[in-house]
Amino acid sequence: MKTRIASWAAAAALTVSAVAVTAAPASADMVPGSTTQFYAYCSVDVLGVPVACTQTDAAHASHVCQYVATSLGVGLDCIQRST
């Protein structure tokens, strides 16, 4: 039981730190013609959903993202970039 609780706590801590990293503003290239969209590199999970996005420059970007308001606070809306 203690192992299960510890693994849940570790997963929650990892999730919170990942959200903090992705939500922290960094130096990123903005998408031309948009004041809200920026380039990001995102890992993709098994279902194809972007996770662990990091703001980056246009040359290294895999996605175009923007911050959106959700019922839980601020979230990221990312679309895979076609190159």
Image (cartoon, grey):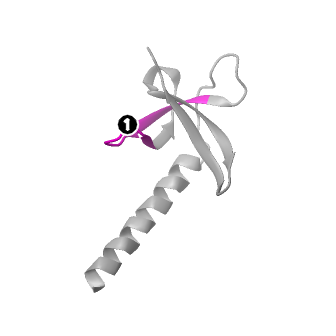
What secondary structure prevails in the magenta region?
Answer: strand
Residue 36: horizontal and vertical position, in percent? Answer: 70, 31
Q: Is residue 4 left or right of residue 62?
A: left
Q: Hey, which residue is sitting farthest bottom in the picture?
A: 2
The answer to if 44 sits in the magenta stretch is: yes
The percent position of residue 16, horizontal first and vertical second, equals 50, 62
On-image quarter of the C terminus: top left
The image quadrant of residue 9 is bottom left
Which residue position holds label 1?
A: 48
Above or below, 5 relative to 72: below
The structure residue drawn at horizontal position 62% and vertical position 44%, both measured from the top left corner, is 25
Outermost residue to the top: 83
Q: Residue at x 47, y 54 (%)?
A: 18
Looking at this view, name the residue that lies furthest to the right. Answer: 35
Q: Count the marks: how many?
A: 1
- Which residue is more in the foreground, 38 or 68? 68
Left or right: residue 18 compared with residue 77: left
Quadrant of residue 4 in the image? Answer: bottom left
Q: Which residues are magenta?
A: 38-51
In this rendering, the answer to whether 29 lies above or below 24 is above
Q: Residue 44 placed where, x, y %? A: 37, 38
**Whether residue 76 is situated above or below residue 20 in the rendered picture:** above
Query: Which residue is at a point 37% across and 70% down the rendered structure image?
Result: 10
Residue 74 vs residue 49: left or right?
Answer: right
State the SS at label 1. Answer: loop
Is residue 40 shown left or right of residue 68? left
Q: Residue 17: where, in percent of width, then height?
A: 48, 59
Q: Quadrant of the N terminus?
A: bottom left
Q: Residues within 10 Å of mark 1 (few under 14, many from 20)?
A: few
Which three-letter amino acid code belongs to the residue tagged 1? Gly
